[in-house]
Image (cartoon, rainbow, N blue to C red):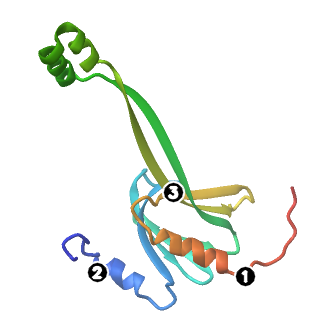
């Protein structure tokens, strides 16, 4: 099993094993932080805050400011017309020009791509809504962060719309 799992950097491993870290994930940052897209970020979920290390900078976000943590999945389907040269040649060999036309006709090919994002919505410094998004497609442990946040007791408050 260790053939497929890369070795973790000792410094990151030490931070992930600190007391109080409930969940640790290493995911590419897509947006919301002042780092280049796809920069690897280490997200440490504590009982009262999130700690994010990305691009050599550590960001702390108290859970009081966090409105929602969720995984958003986007499925995109594309349809392409594809003709078969091999089918045309086989059709021509079997039934001549009519077989070539039938064997080489355009067929529809459907391509489906799925993307998943771990999205942290929070109230920014200026009070405006803000978010941080991470690519969560290949990191199933992101669901653990969502579950912990949803189990967290919510404080009732006043919301102005």
Q: Residue at x 24, y 23 (%)?
A: 84
* Left or right: 18 in relation to 86: right
Indicate the position of residue 47 as horizontal and vertical percent values: 60, 84
* Left or right: 7 in relation to 130: left
Mark 3 or mark 2: name the one nearer the start of the chain: 2
Q: Quadrant of residue 126?
A: bottom right
Label 2 Cα crowd, 10 Å radius (few <14 / some 14-19 / many 20+) = few
Indicate the position of residue 39 as horizontal and vertical percent values: 39, 57
Q: Can you identify the residue that label 1 sits on?
A: 153
Using the image as rendered, state which of residue 83 and residue 112 is in the foreground. Answer: 83
Residue 124 numbered tag: none
* Left or right: 161 in relation to 57: right
Label 1 Cα crowd, 10 Å radius (few <14 / some 14-19 / many 20+) = few
Vertical placement of 114 versus 140: above or below? above
- Callout 3: helix, strand or loop? strand
Mark 1 or mark 2: name the one nearer the start of the chain: 2
Indicate the position of residue 86 as horizontal and vertical percent values: 17, 24
Using the image as rendered, state which of residue 80 and residue 38 is in the foreground. Answer: 80
Label 3 Cα crowd, 10 Å radius (few <14 / some 14-19 / many 20+) = many
C-alpha span from label 3 to label 1: 24 Å
Q: Can you identify the residue that label 3 sits on?
A: 117
Indicate the position of residue 31 as horizontal and vertical percent values: 51, 52
Q: Can you identify the residue that label 2 sits on?
A: 10
Q: Quadrant of residue 67?
A: bottom right
Q: Residue at x 75, y 60 (%)?
A: 127
Mark nearest the camera among 1 and 2 is 1
């Amino acid at each position: 099993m260790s053939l497929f799992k890369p070795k973790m950097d000792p410094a990151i491993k030490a931070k992930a094993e600190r007391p109080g870290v409930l969940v640790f994930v290493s995911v590419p940052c897509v947006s919301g932080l002042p780092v280049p897209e796809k920069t690897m970020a280490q997200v440490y979920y504590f009982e009262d805050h999130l700690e994010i290390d990305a691009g050599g900078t550590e960001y702390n976000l108290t859970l009081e400011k966090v409105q929602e943590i969720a995984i958003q999945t986007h499925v995109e389907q594309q349809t392409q017309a594809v003709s078969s040269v091999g089918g045309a040649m086989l059709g021509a060999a079997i039934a001549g020009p009519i077989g070539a036309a039938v064997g080489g006709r355009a067929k529809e090919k459907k391509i489906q791509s799925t993307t998943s994002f771990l999205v942290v919505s929070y109230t920014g410094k200026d009070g405006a809504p803000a978010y941080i998004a991470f690519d969560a497609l290949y990191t199933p442990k992101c669901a653990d962060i969502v579950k912990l946040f949803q189990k967290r007791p919510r404080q009732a408050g006043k919301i102005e719309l």
